[in-house]
Structure formats: C-alpha cells, structure tokens
Amino acid sequence: MAQGETALGENMELEVDLGPMPSESKKGSLLDGLRGLLDRRELCDVALVSSHSGDVFPCHRAVLAASSAAFRERLPKTGDDCVKEPGGLPSLRLEGVTHSEAVKALLDSVYGADVKENEDGTVEYLYSPSSEEANRDVLRLARDFGLAALEDQASRWLARGLTTSNVLRRLAACEEFGLREVRDKILEQLTANTDALYELVSDPAVIGVPGVLRDLLLRMLHLLGVPAREGEATKDRPKK
C-alpha cells in the first residue's frame, strides 16, 4: 500500500477550523434580550411604583424574583383582586423613595444595564446618581431587597469625588447604613490630611452625627499624641 493511503473502511480523523468562538457580547446574551424587552416595555407583567412621585416602571416578575428572595416574597399576586396601575399591571409600591431615579438604578442593576464592556475587555460601571439624597434612596432599596451588587455600587460612590463640603454627608450616610468599611477608609484619608480634618471637626453640623464626631475627635487626639485610655477604641486597637 502506497504511503498516505488507508485500508478501505478504516476511520480517518478530519479537522475543520471554524475560527474562534464568538464572545458573549457579540452573540448577544439573555440579559441583552431582557433589557431590550424592558426598554420596549414588552411582555411586562408587573410594575414598580415610586410612592413619592407615582412614577410607574413596568418590568418582569421573573427577573425581579430571580434577583432576590425579598422580591419573590413581596411581589403582588396575580389575579383580578390585586392592586393594579392605570396600565393594568399588578404593582409593588416602593415606600419612602423620594427620587424615581433610584428605582431606575435598581432596575438597571437587576437587568445588568449598569455596566458597559469596552472593546479591550475592561468593564465600566455606569452608576451615577444625581445627588446625595438619590444615592441614599438607592441604598435604602438595595438594603430593602437584599441587592448586594447595587449596594456595593452605591457604597463605592460615597468614596468618589470627596471634598470637605460633602464628606460629612457621606460619613453620615455610612453611619445610617452601617457601611463601616467605607466610613473607615474615608476617615483614614481625613487623618492623612490634617487641614481637612480640622475643617471638618470645626463644622457645626458634625454635632448631628455623634458617631462620626467621636471618631474624628479620637483621631485628632491621636495626632496630638494623646494616648488612648484603656478599653478605648482606636484605629489600631478596637474597643474590647
């Protein structure tokens, strides 16, 4: 038998190169399709309603239920006896939400519309609330519905764009929502900038945030070389 020939009936291996597999972003993902349905308000079967403004946000029950157990428990029941909005959708009213953009931020997070994948593979987070108060509403919703990714974005925002004019409000938000790690990181930066630290301590509004005031005074005493009392909390020695 000549070289390169095979016996009749013998299996031969064949290789076909179809090129690399397309990425998920090129093929389109399930979340892409769901976002498209949300944008076009197609197949929506439930609505989130801002209690303050009355703005209605149609969305999909299955997506909300899949995002958190709190949504699964609190989504309105289907049927003729459920509370419906003018559009005819069963509704869930979000109490205590002053800024409607917070509801949109919630939906953006749940539907994956809060991130953008760049061509180089890096990810850009698009979360950008218009005010401190709007960010607080987002934190409330994230806590209320157990949305860890949304809470993380709102928490990280508190550490961005810090100035001596907004740092007290940011620290107060950390106190309100128990964001200890963010709070400690901000206080560390203040300790490293004595001018900013003294300016904040002299602000009369700091009295309204006693927990922050206490930590600031302790850090000032530490900078002045005053030793902490036995059992007193410091940055390097937590309270026993």
Image (tube, rainbow, N blue to C red):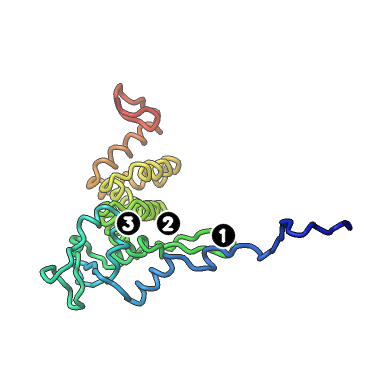
Q: Which residue is mark 3?
A: 67
Which badge, 3 or 2, is on the more N-terminal residue?
Answer: 3
Q: Depth-wise, is mark 1 or mark 2 nearer the camera?
A: 1
Which badge, 1 or 2, is on the more N-terminal residue?
Answer: 1
Label 1 CA crowd tier, 10 Å (few <14, some 14–19, many 20+): few
Q: Which residue is mark 2?
A: 161
Per the image, label 3 sits on a secondary structure element best described as helix
Quarter occupied by the N terminus:
bottom right
Q: Quadrant of residue 79?
A: bottom left
Per the image, label 1 sits on a secondary structure element best described as loop
Nearer to the camera, 64 or 141: 64
Q: In this picture, is 94 found above or below 218?
A: below
The amino acid beneath tag 3 is Ser
Q: Which residue is mark 1?
A: 121
Nearer to the camera, 139 or 58: 58
The amino acid beneath tag 1 is Gly
The amino acid beneath tag 2 is Gly
